[in-house]
Image (cartoon, coloured by chain):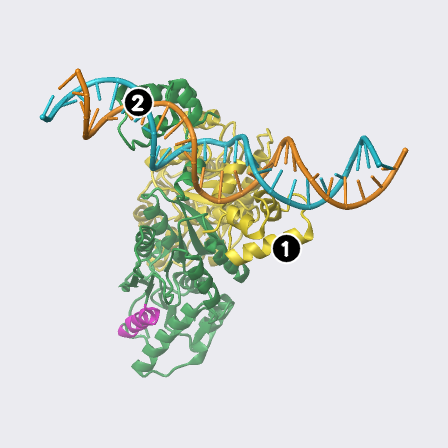
Chain colours: A yellow, B green, C orange, D cyan
Amino acid sequence: MATILDVAARAGVGVGTVSRVLNESSAVSATTRQLVLTAIEELGYQPSSLARNLSLGRSSSVFVVAPILTSPAVTTRLRGVLEALSLTGLDPILLEVANEEQSRDRFRRIAERGRAEGAVVIDLRPSPAESAVLLRAGTRCVFVGQDVEGWPSAWADEAHGTRIATEHLIGLGHRRIAYVGEPQSIAASRRRLRGFNSAVTAADFETDGALVISRADSEAAVGGILDAGRPPSAVVAGSDWRAITVLAEARRRGMRVPDDLSVIGFDGSDLARHIGLTTIGQQLAESGRWAVESLLALIAGSEAVPRHRLRLDLIEGETTGPCGT
Amino acid sequence: MATILDVAARAGVGVGTVSRVLNESSAVSATTRQLVLTAIEELGYQPSSLARNLSLGRSSSVFVVAPILTSPAVTTRLRGVLEALSLTGLDPILLEVANEEQSRDRFRRIAERGRAEGAVVIDLRPSPAESAVLLRAGTRCVFVGQDVEGWPSAWADEAHGTRIATEHLIGLGHRRIAYVGEPQSIAASRRRLRGFNSAVTAADFETDGALVISRADSEAAVGGILDAGRPPSAVVAGSDWRAITVLAEARRRGMRVPDDLSVIGFDGSDLARHIGLTTIGQQLAESGRWAVESLLALIAGSEAVPRHRLRLDLIEGETTGPCGT
DNA sequence: GTCTACCGTGGAAGCGGTTCCATCAACCAT
DNA sequence: ATGGTTGATGGAACCGCTTCCACGGTAGAC
């Protein structure tokens, strides 16, 4: 493979001149420039980005850390990040987190110096110890989907979101409302459940613990609720992904949505839009773009720690309707 | 930031020795090693992977090119790739392709030398010109989801897949079967439609062109079919993503699945499994892992051009059932 | 007691760029 | 004619690591 030295030799100029032509960094006479360009052409020369980066002392890539890509909320957010990043010339190195161990590994990874200019972390949070390590290492890091103390982050008031969702159903006349969420081990899902509870309490309904599901095996549990003597007329789901579980269970039972059962999701993912699921939109793609912008500012030297509250909107699809009974 | 020179100075040894300790490349006496390790510890030294890679003449990353991440088939495949890659120490640089222009850009990008060791390309194919450029540049490249002439690729016999799907429905007694696919501009979707047609022809049914949809606006068109005087009793979808469109349209009309309408998808994505969609599995995650293995072989110097036919299986969910009428 | 072998080690060269500094020619003003 | 600019250019130094080669010292063989 040809190097810049080969090009310089062939064009009969110095390496400095070739570099200047390559980067248009300072004036080069038209004739010399042409000489260099033909030499480049003839040799099929391509500059080594590796060498360039070392010399410049940057990596031109950023880490993007995300939970396992199954959930549509994650992929939608990720798309926002990728889209914004592709306009910057920074390459995204994608690190997926499938379990606790990988989470630790990824946080250790992004604290390493040099490999990347910074990191965008989606829907994950560091432990206090990890946060301290990142801080000490001077890692430039932005969080989306989680409010991480002391770090740039964009997040939504999730309790408020499920409250809106629940109130929407109450407004439609529903009185027996179930909640189906992710396991309570995740902080975000605790917040979401809290919003549901507060809305139900405020409306002064009978609260029925049996109607609340938030554990790993919710598929089976959802079936249990729907088959019970007094099934709910509506379900608030803790995520769009959970919502389609509920839709699937309803379908298996020949229940009609929204006539027999109203279902509302949470996230405003691509998937929700695609199937007309009523949901709480939390500006997923926008939040990804915001993260990239904030990271760029950090890289440019900004000391600010921007914190961004994401707007929540009810997105009405066709899976919620007035209570039949 | 401390460099290897600082460490060497502090430990009172030469840089070579520090490097040897770092890489355990050759014998270092226990006392010297300890000296170096404490110096590293005290300085908080971290080696620069950039410099290391330049010196070693490798990049320790690979490109992963994928269409826009909306479709669950893509993300499922991608997960297989990421999972396999995370075991290798190679970092995935994710390049998303949202349109024709980006496709050209990405193929140009992966042909650049040095930035990555190779590329895994998901569900996309290069034009002959692009393929030639890749070949000339000596790019190590593996394709999944597309059979690309002259390149390592893993793909499924898609026509066969839709044939299996259609025959499954016929076996359940369905006679009026619709097809809902992606636009015919995509080669893969042409193959899928062909399989459907051949199964219908073989079964010697009345063929009804009005029951075949394969264009961009299929959502609306699906509704048209379901509302028609003689709606189909079953639908073959060209992908899982299309299948859930059909499910959504059925739900809007209060149709029960599978009682009023059977729906079968194509891909065997995470989503299909999650909602119990009957589909044609094409080993998505496995194909991603296969791609990584093949790429590793290429990087290791293999000259072979492995070509891998993916197995197709009917995955029975709960969205297909015997014909009611 | 000398010779060879080998182990541990220091340090220079090299990976392929960028950039700074010195040089030189051409041009302008005095 | 002379000094001062200015613009284009060559090339050394440097980015931070790996690796090869040379060297000194110890130990085993004779």
Q: Mark 1 lies on which chain?
A: A
Estimate the x, y position of residue B152 in percent, counting from the top left: 34, 61
Q: Which amino acid does label 1 sit on?
A: Gln
SS assignment for the magenta stretch, majority: helix
Kind of element beneath mark 1: helix
Magenta part of the protein: which range? B157-171
Decide whether residue B312 is among the magenta residues: no
> Quarter of the image containing the C terminus of chain B?
bottom left
Kind of element beneath mark 2: helix
Residue at image position (64%, 47%) is A24
Estimate the x, y position of residue B44 in percent, counting from the top left: 42, 23
Determine if residue B20 is in view: yes
User: Quick one: B16 or A121, which is closer to the camera?
Assistant: B16
Which residue, given by chain and number where applicable, does mark 1 sit on? A34
Q: Taking D5 as reference, is B214 above or below it?
A: below
Residue at image position (41%, 18%) is B10
Estimate the x, y position of residue B224 in percent, counting from the top left: 49, 72
Mark 2 packing: few (<14 Cα in 10 Å), some, or many (20+)? many
Residue at image position (40%, 22%) is B8
Q: Which of marks 1 and 2 is in front?
A: 1
Which residue, given by chain and number where applicable, does mark 2 sit on? B33
